[in-house]
Image (spheres, rainbow, N blue to C red):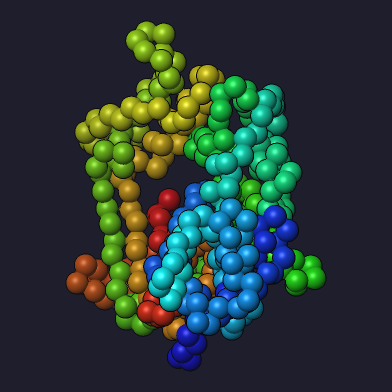
Amino acid sequence: MTETPYRLAWYGVDLRTGGIIEDLPSLRPTGALSRKLGASTTTQFELALGGAPREWEAATAPGRSVLVAVDTVTDIPVWAGGVLPRAGGSANSVQFGAATLESYLDARYPGTQTMVGVDQATVCANLAAPALSQGPPFVIDAVATGVTMDYLTDDGDDKTVLSCLTEVMGLEGGPEWTIDVAWNGSRSGFEFPLRIRSAVGLQSASPEGVFDYPGCVAEYTLSESYERDKGATRVLARGEGEGSSRLSSPATDATALLAGGWPLWEYRYTPATGVTDPDQLTAHASRSLALMAEGAKVWTVQAVASRAPRLGDAWALGDSVRLSVTSSPRHPAGADVVARCWAWELEPDADRIRPILVEE
């Protein structure tokens, strides 16, 4: 097998325009790069001042810049994060923290919107639309889900775009979303597609990305849990308030499991702030039950990055990925699992990549 290590080219980019300010060859992450569906992740960085270009300060300005990593083998941008804290002084390096651009949506508000009988993807696109004004070069890439819904938000509720999108994604059959990074048309910088789909990525029973053990996989772990928040055979979603006036979904049961002899495990929760529609609470309860009825099953795969299927080429966030185990102490007879990549971590210097696979 040909080994191709990851070599990342780092760029300091203007957050408002996406234009490249400087190449940053002396920048390096001090932790793993990571991404997760519908959520922001953070990474710490260090910039050696001895190798820093003239405009390094503008290229890393907190609140005004974004760091972008491009895989030099495929020329595919794989990660982008807005610079938030920066610290330096008498040392020969400067420290940064950066968060993927989902975090920006937690600093923007959708305003008052009333949507009745609107496709879920359009609801998400409308909620995100205010962030296109005076914000990063987002490109809304929404594909109709074929499922309509009602959604109301009032500016007085102070709910951010991120909290609203998180709420909609948490509904039963709710759409998924993520923010990617791509070259712009002139290749003078980058744009940030906000993907909205029924399911982000490519789902297939025979995916291109195959991780094998023994093989490119150094180690793996199957984590199974029926702890609180991870397993339940009855779910009840509650709105805000107290006592008998509090909105509630009906109790949603895993009837087939209960009839088959499973114990009753109850779980009650408040899915989001400001939910006033009983139908939305019911949808939240149904989605949670679908995920929790048989407990959580998560495969954490640690692979040799230079030998594994290439991120951004053979697989990406949201895609189906196959884990093929010939034999291991946990699975002496082997295992062959196709699961979705809900998150990933990449450590180029350590030659490690970790897709986080969730069985659905």
User: Looking at this rendering, what residue extends furthest in the top direction?
Assistant: 244
Tell me if 309 is positioned left or right of 223 in this view. Answer: right
Q: Which residue is more in the foreground, 233 or 58?
A: 58
4 relative to 13, above or below: below
Residue in the image at 67% along x and 25% along y? 112
User: Looking at this rendering, what residue extends furthest in the bottom direction?
Assistant: 2
Residue in the image at 67% along x and 61% along y? 14
User: Looking at this rendering, what residue extends furthest in the left direction?
Assistant: 329
Residue in the image at 26% along x and 76% along y? 327
Q: Which residue is more in the foreground, 340 or 57?
A: 57
Residue 92 visible at all: yes
238 relative to 91, above or below: above
Number of dots carrying numbers: 0
Q: In which quarter of the image is residue 10?
A: bottom right
Q: In which quarter of the image is residue 147?
A: top right
Q: Which residue is more in the foreground, 79 or 231?
A: 79
Residue 338 visible at all: no
Q: Which residue is more in the foreground, 264 or 218?
A: 218
Percent across and percent down for residue 198 are 60, 46
Q: Quadrant of residue 118?
A: top right
Residue in the image at 30% along x and 69% along y? 220
User: Looking at this rendering, what residue extends furthest in the front direction?
Assistant: 90
Q: Quadrant of the N terminus?
A: bottom left
Tell me if 70 is positioned left or right of 49 in this view. Answer: right
339 relative to 71, above or below: above
250 relative to 312, above or below: above
Percent across and percent down for residue 286 are 44, 32
Percent across and percent down for residue 291 are 39, 42
Percent across and percent down for residue 233 are 31, 33
